[in-house]
Amino acid sequence: MSPVDPAPAATLTDPLLRVSGLKKSFGDNEVLRSIDLSVQAGQVLALVGPSGSGKTTVLRCLNGLEQPDAGTVEFSEGPAVSFTAKTTRREKESLRTRSAMVFQGYNLFPHKTVLQNVTEGPIQVQKRPKAEAIAEAERLLERVGLAEKRDDYPHQLSGGQQQRVGIVRALAQQPALLLFDEPTSALDPELVGDVLTVIKELAEEGWTMVLVTHELAFAREVADTVVFMDGGVVVEQGPAQDVLRAPKQERTRAFVHRLLNPF
Amino acid sequence: MELPDIDWQLAIDSFWPLLRGGLTGTIPLTLASFTVGLALALMLALMRISGNRLLAGVARAYISVIRGTPLLVQLFVIFFGLPSIGVTIDPWPSAVIAFSMNVGGYAAEVIRAAILSVPKGQWEAGYTIGMSRGQTLRRLILPQAARVSVPPLSNTFISLVKDTSLASLILVTEMFRVAQEVAAFSREFMLLYVEAAVIYWVFCLVLSTVQDRLERRLDRYVAR
């Protein structure tokens, strides 16, 4: 594994991302009822909880894919957006300059090759020199073991390979924050490991991440902080070991027990 | 019914004028109308999905009128109708205007459906790599929508090739007009009209081949 990418210096006093009072309803359905979170630079935060608990919605509010009804999303060196009904598209878009996302369903661009998928953002959006963007993309593909797939189209790859391309596409943007939305949920069980390994390596290198996951064992191993959500509120949060091994709240305990003992 | 006594000499003599009518009338008329019509259709499709109720309403009304009235009537309104309110347009531009407006109305729905068929995750992936809506549409969504819309747009195109024969009624010299003139002169109606039909058919066969190739080219990234 090659040495660290843009190594984020961990400053414990100043969180990279601060979220407060996040509220979101879909019609009558109140999905988020005031969520507060903060993520230190270099930290991995895992959002866990039953389906419908709002964890994916939180993640999607962090980059404006969903527009919260209220609350603020604030990066330490900007941008910061206080959401109201009048929040403009431009403000929402500003959040995307600091983060990149890895999707559950990969969402690779089917009409572009692996390499083009990765360089699309750097070249078209960030206007980086083409040769530099390609060299960077090749280096990143190399580290996830997909160098020889650079000219393939996504449909020619397995799910695990596609998701690794998804991760590389996110890394290529050199974001301050990586967002993972259930990155292994769509994968065949035997392919999950490859993807988790890559994410774990990134965590060890000091990337700041927010991760929505059902893989509790993985969250325990990789996350610094675990946030357990249920019914649109944060039920419990704290160091991964505490929340997942010795949960204080009954709801957390029931959830962890259910996932670890499915039968 | 009597057996046709084919005047082969006339068939041969009239072939070149007819083909020339096709090459200088039918084909340029089709290409010009389709190009303008497609641009119009894209604009209308984007208006309909814009989320702006006024724009969407205007596009919807336009499409409804175009699809709800005969092409021949549209053509006559432009060529014979407009002069009575002081707007006189020559035959050729009249035909191009009528056909483009018509193609625009039909193709708009095709393009709109094709855009909507691209999964929402593609827009989101575009947004999360920092693209604006316009950039995402242009670089990610439209190329994928293009693949979906080739077969139905080819239909529109092939219909257009044949519909241009209506321009003969507003004095545009395209293939069918030539056939009519030669037929009137020689009294060989059957021969000339069948000959014209054959040439239209060959044009459309060629177009179908082009469509196949285009589909195969755009298919290279699709799982089979």
Image (cartoon, rainbow, N blue to C red):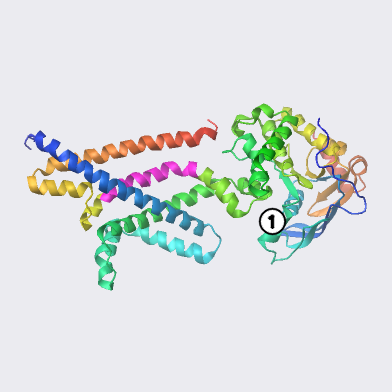
Looking at the rendered structure, the kind of residue marked 1 is Glu
State the residue at coordinates (86%, 36%).
A204
Q: Which of the 4 quarters of the picture holds residue B41?
A: bottom left
Across and down, in percent, residue B119 comes to 58, 45
Q: Nearer the viewer, residue A235 or B18?
A: B18
How many marks can you see? 1
* Left or right: residue A86 compared with residue A218: left
Q: Nearer the viewer, residue B154 or B26?
A: B26
Q: Nearer the viewer, residue B162 or B182?
A: B182
Q: Main secondary structure of the magenta part?
A: helix
Residue, disc 1:
A93
Residue extending furthest bottom?
B85
Q: Which chain hosts label 1?
A: A
Instruction: Identify the magenta region.
Output: B146-164
State the residue at coordinates (89%, 48%).
A250
* Left or right: residue A115 compared with residue A203: left
